[in-house]
Amino acid sequence: MRPRRTPVLAGPVAALLAVLVVLAGCSSAPLARPEASDRTSPPELGACYPLTPEDVGSSSNDTDPVACGAAHTSQTFAVGTLPESTGAAYDDRAHGRWIYPRCEAAFEKFLGVDESLAMRIQLSWAWFRPSQEGWDKGARWYRCDLVGGSTEATAYRPLPQDAKGLFAAKPPEQWLTCASGPTVLEAEKLPCTEPHDWRAVTTIKLGQPDDEYPGERLVQVRTRDFCSDSVGAWMNYPVDYEYGYTWFKEAEWQAGNRRSVCWARTDR
């Protein structure tokens, strides 16, 4: 019997995942903290911090590190120097465009995830640079931090003492993404250890880094068709199943995202 596949449309997402990470670091009007760090020496690799989503909304950060054995929501996984080619201006958007693929690759390597799984976990990353004061003194360092929540999170969860290799073995359910609600678009995203109606099970790659944006309609159709088959295979081809999909628009494409997410309706 031909399976009956019911798509539950998720709709385009205007500000999710990769694009939010980029914008968090390259905003031309950062939410400056009153005493933002003016240090010129780079931060410590592996340092842990009790960051909040509000902290991630700033271009620089002066939160004091804590012992990684204590409660923390952030861990620095990459430190480096912004090249002169990204511009001399503190708020040049070229900094964010340059940093995105580098922090993203380091994020995936640090956790032990591939590009597909990286889009389906309850973890994300943010990057910071010196304050305006530090920049004016010649500092061009950057730091990339793992944070204990998705780009949609309103609060972060505590991280393990050392998150390096967290997904190297079996992916921990408490950090995988599921959702609760009648449709993916309306659903609340949550860890898969909590009761849920949907699970993010696969992604589709829609282009290479240098490809032009193919247009929203083509992205949606290709995502729908792929997710129909992919979710059916993940569910072992039942007669009747529902699936959802999340695709992204041109702003996310320009920020570097080339994938859409497929969701299976399931409570497991």
Image: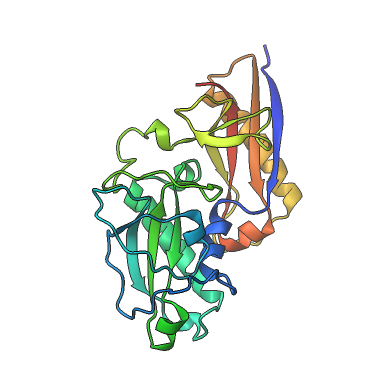
Q: Is residue 53 left or right of residue 70?
A: right
Q: Is residue 79 left or right of residue 94?
A: left
Percent x, y of residue 194: 48, 27
In the picture, residue 210 is in which quadrant? bottom right
Q: Residue at x 68, y 16 (%)?
A: 2
Give the residue furthest to the right: 217
Give the residue furthest to the top: 1
Q: Residue at x 34, y 50 (%)?
A: 72
Percent x, y of residue 225: 67, 35
In this rendering, the count of numbered labels is: 0
Colouring of the image:
rainbow
For residue 127, above or below residue 231 = below
Residue 121 appearing in the image:
yes
For residue 203, above or below residue 151 = above
Between 68 and 239, the residue placed more toward the observer is 68
Between 176 and 180, the residue placed more toward the observer is 180
For residue 152, above or below residue 176 = below
In the picture, residue 102 is in which quadrant? bottom left
For residue 77, above or below residue 165 = below
Percent x, y of residue 21: 52, 59
Residue 97 appearing in the image:
no
Quadrant of the rendering where the N terminus is positioned: top right
Percent x, y of residue 154: 54, 48
Q: Is residue 187 left or right of residue 81?
A: right
Give the residue furthest to the front: 34
Q: Residue at x 27, y 63 (%)?
A: 45
